[in-house]
Image (cartoon, rainbow, N blue to C red):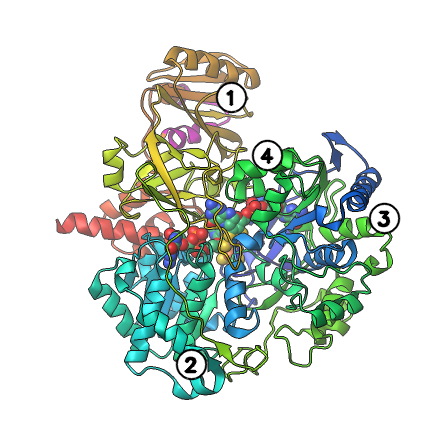
Amino acid sequence: MTTGVRSTCPYCGVGCGIVATPDGKGGAAVEGDHDHPANQGRLCSKGAALGETLSLEDRLLHPEIDGQRVSWEVALDTVAEGLRQTIEAHGPEAVAFYVSGQLLTEDYYAANKLIKGFLGTANIDTNSRLCMASSVAGHKRAFGSDTVPGLYEDFERADLVVLVGSNLAWCHPVLFQRLEAARRVRPSMKVVVVDPRRTETCDIADLHLALKPGSDVALFNVLLASLAERGMADRRFVEQHTSGLGDALDAARATDAAACGLPPADLATFLDLFARTEKVVTLYSQGVNQSSAGVDKVNALINCHLLTGRIGRPGMGPFSITGQPNAMGGREVGALSNALAAHMDFGPVEIDRVARFWGAPHMATKPGLKAVDLFEAVRAGRIKAVWIMATNPVASLPDADAVREALRGCELSIVSEAIRASDTVDTCRIRLPALAWAEKDGTVTNSERGISRQRPFLPPPGEAKQDWWILAEVARRLGHGEAFAWRGVADIFREHAALSGFENAGTRDFDIGACASIDDAAYQALQPFVWGRAADRRFFGDGAFFHADRRARFIATMPRAPVNAPDEERPLILNTGRVRDQWHTMTRTGKSVRLAGHRPEPMIEVHPRDASVRGLVDGDIAEVRSGWGRGVLRVHVTDSVSLGQAFAPMHWTAQLSRAGRINAAVNPAVDPLSGQPELKHTPVEIRRVDMHWHGTILARRPIMLPEISYWVRIRGAGYHAYVVAGDQPFAVAQRTLSAAVRTTNPGPWLDGDNGVGAVVSDGRVEAVMALGSTYQADARDRFAPFMALNRLTTEQRDALLHGGTDMHRGGELCACFGISCGAVEAAIADGATSLAAIGATTQAGTNCGSCRPEIRALLRAARHVRAA
Ligand SMILES: Nc1nc2c(c(=O)[nH]1)N[C@H]1C(S)=C(S)[C@@H](COP(=O)(O)OP(=O)(O)OC[C@H]3O[C@@H](n4cnc5c(=O)[nH]c(N)nc54)[C@H](O)[C@@H]3O)O[C@H]1N2
Ligand SMILES: Nc1nc2c(c(=O)[nH]1)N[C@H]1C(S)=C(S)[C@@H](COP(=O)(O)OP(=O)(O)OC[C@H]3O[C@@H](n4cnc5c(=O)[nH]c(N)nc54)[C@H](O)[C@@H]3O)O[C@H]1N2
Ligand code: SF4
Ligand SMILES: [Mo]
């Protein structure tokens, strides 16, 4: 019997249930909830490390205006007065909110209601614009509603799972584990990965289609034509429940398969597999959505499911997997600028309906600006007041320097944030301290429409308040107290549920009207549930779509190239995305020591041939430059990216690196229908940056680094690690860096061999630094054990200064137990030939399982070496 608090993981859209047991000292132990339907007790490396992210050291705990601490009264009055004056002087369209799929549904509902019903503008967009907007638009075109038809169990029941532009192993690891487990039981099940990059997800793939970037529409057009040709159409379903097949087929038949750049045999295998397998799930994510053809990609793949009638039945259907914990909740409350609320749009009847329900005096009557345009309007001065909540646009929007410039020039920039410093917080005038995950109360909706509670298990710190409360207080000051007179989150949830059922009568998919009357105790105790229509909670198996004529639409999609094409000056295509152990802009995962080891530095992956023609070798520092801006990153040479392509993670910001914030270089091209940016495709050139020296510093107290070309800050256990490089003369670097180290870490300086120096005070290492002419990838791991010691023996001091052991070679692999690649390789060299054997000798891979694909890759590599 667990005594902890049941809540939901605040990271990805899988929505795993957790049980948190506070330790009474401000922390908590976090475990997977065995009773939660999404994960049944499983957690990935990020979920398992949640307990390490709870400290208050970097939290924003008091309201601030222009850097000065103020009371809530002053802050709220200033916000309300600022909004009022802006609207009076320039009209409601001069105001905007930019919100996030990481708000709870109740917060999200409050933000949307305030701006659309009471401020009179739909200039509210959410970071879901960067994430799910193309899926939303594609669903609406095909189904007449933004509906995800299937359930997680469909992946387990399918005979073929096609993963399109999804790195499930790293981005939805618990679903990946469920898929792996299902395949162990039923090895006949097939998995196909469609991704220009060879990701860890390919580890379980029977077939990897490394298609040309952006060519998904062509691939699914070819599939559609081939299915029709082979007589695979479900005639009855198509005739009774769809329209538009003719045009879609014409477009499909006119498509040239060569556009995908795939080996013909692989393409044929895929077409065969899809044709002869009835139970197919096509799961897709950002490789589809984040594209200037994102909506067409979505419809091209839905077309194939409509043709075959493989939708909304067990083991079948298109499945848009959501990224953020509450991406779906945001769609339910309607916080995209072109949606209204409760899955309603800006039609006259719906505007009137929502206005009546809210008692709204200033109802927005037309869609507002989409994220990229919204910040452009801020930059151009058309929007004069912007309020950002739970998102970090200066790091996560494309052309990010322009976003920073826009915010710096904005008269009234407001941010509600949990942390004190971020690339966005640093640019905003009014800073409102928000409660964070462990303290918040409300609900979230996961990728399969599953609503779960987030329950607080730590007390609210400082003066931080939950987002809905902040919004309601501003609303009250603007004279709308009655409409925002909620006593708590249960009131908001009931109102939200009531709106979903209001004048619905089966016309809208989203209807949780039954929850409108639950009492506070029932809300408190709410068990996870999946909303849906049929008895089995799936949609569309019965062909009842939401267009007025109840038919789904085939969409004729014509392949088109990404907006910005590579050329002579910028011949490489920059693709961006995620790594296993970091979440977005690292404001939370960056606090965990065990998550820091897997990919410690911002990097650019390049193909060996692209590297060699540019004189780049693994470990170099390179500048990635586009027509918009630049980043400076560590080079990783790998054939997991194809020739002509490069990949960089989106996670690093100006807080943790000199110039790892890659979105400074990413192009702001968008899909014309969804407005979703093309974050996976920017033409760039990459060049080596000559560094005169490289170094690593571990220090107990943070260091103010002098101006240098490259630095990264990495979390260590009781210390801060810095990996640095620069082009000053070596002697200058040595002098300025050691001075910087000693300023905050005073004590006697000892010189060692090979550029090593350390501050050792009272026998304890306060700081250690190694500078040299080459990059030592393992220096941090080599020094780390010494930082764990309270007193060095003479031998240990000698080992620190004159060369230690090499046990930690190769970076961290297993985040749960801190096992390095080197240790796993050593186990393999000692005869371990299976995951189980490696687990038994090293523990690696035996907890959350997120590193199992990488362990299997090392095993395979070792087998190749033995075979050769
Ligand atoms: N570890 C971790 N997990 C996360 C997150 C995180 O920050 N860290 N964030 C969460 C969020 S919000 C989201 S949205 C999801 C994203 O989850 P995913 O979409 O799975 O992750 P990404 O790495 O953004 O991109 C997926 C893949 O798209 C591929 N791709 C690029 N261009 C194309 C193309 O033209 N066609 C195809 N077919 N593929 C292409 C990329 O190579 C990449 O491997 O992850 C969620 N989970
Ligand atoms: N190049 C490139 N860029 C991308 C992507 C990509 O694949 N490539 N992916 C895009 C996608 S899919 C997404 S979803 C975005 C994500 O990008 P962002 O949303 O900008 O990233 P986060 O770091 O999650 O930002 C959330 C912020 O909210 C704060 N916060 C946490 N909890 C709360 C709370 O309860 N209340 C408040 N007020 N604040 C809180 C956190 O401290 C953090 O600063 O990035 C997008 N940008
Ligand atoms: S898969 Fe990992 S990040 Fe996603 S919800 Fe589950 S534990 Fe959290
Ligand atoms: Mo996302």
Q: Which mark is residue 755?
A: none
**SS of the residue at dot 2?**
loop
Label 1, label 3: how far apart the Cα atoms are: 44 Å
Residue 115 x/y as whole percent: 73, 54
Label 3, label 2: how far apart the Cα atoms are: 53 Å
Q: Is residue 185 visible?
A: no
Q: Residue at (53%, 33%) from the top-left corner? A: 654
Q: Which residues are magenta?
A: 779-796
Q: Which mark is residue 405?
A: 4
**SS of the residue at dot 1?**
loop
User: 48 or 115: which is nearer to us?
Assistant: 115
Label 4, label 1: how far apart the Cα atoms are: 25 Å
The amino acid beneath tag 2 is Gly
Bin the neighbour count of mark 2 within 10 Å (Cα to Cα): few under 14, some 14-19, many 20 and up.
Answer: many
Residue 490 x/y as whole percent: 76, 63
- Picture quarter containing residue 55? top right
Lower position in the chain sequence, tag 1 or tag 3? 3
Q: Which mark is residue 477?
A: 3
Lower position in the chain sequence, tag 3 or tag 2? 2
Q: Is residue 670 visible?
A: yes
Residue ID for mark 1: 705
Residue at the left extreme?
A: 868
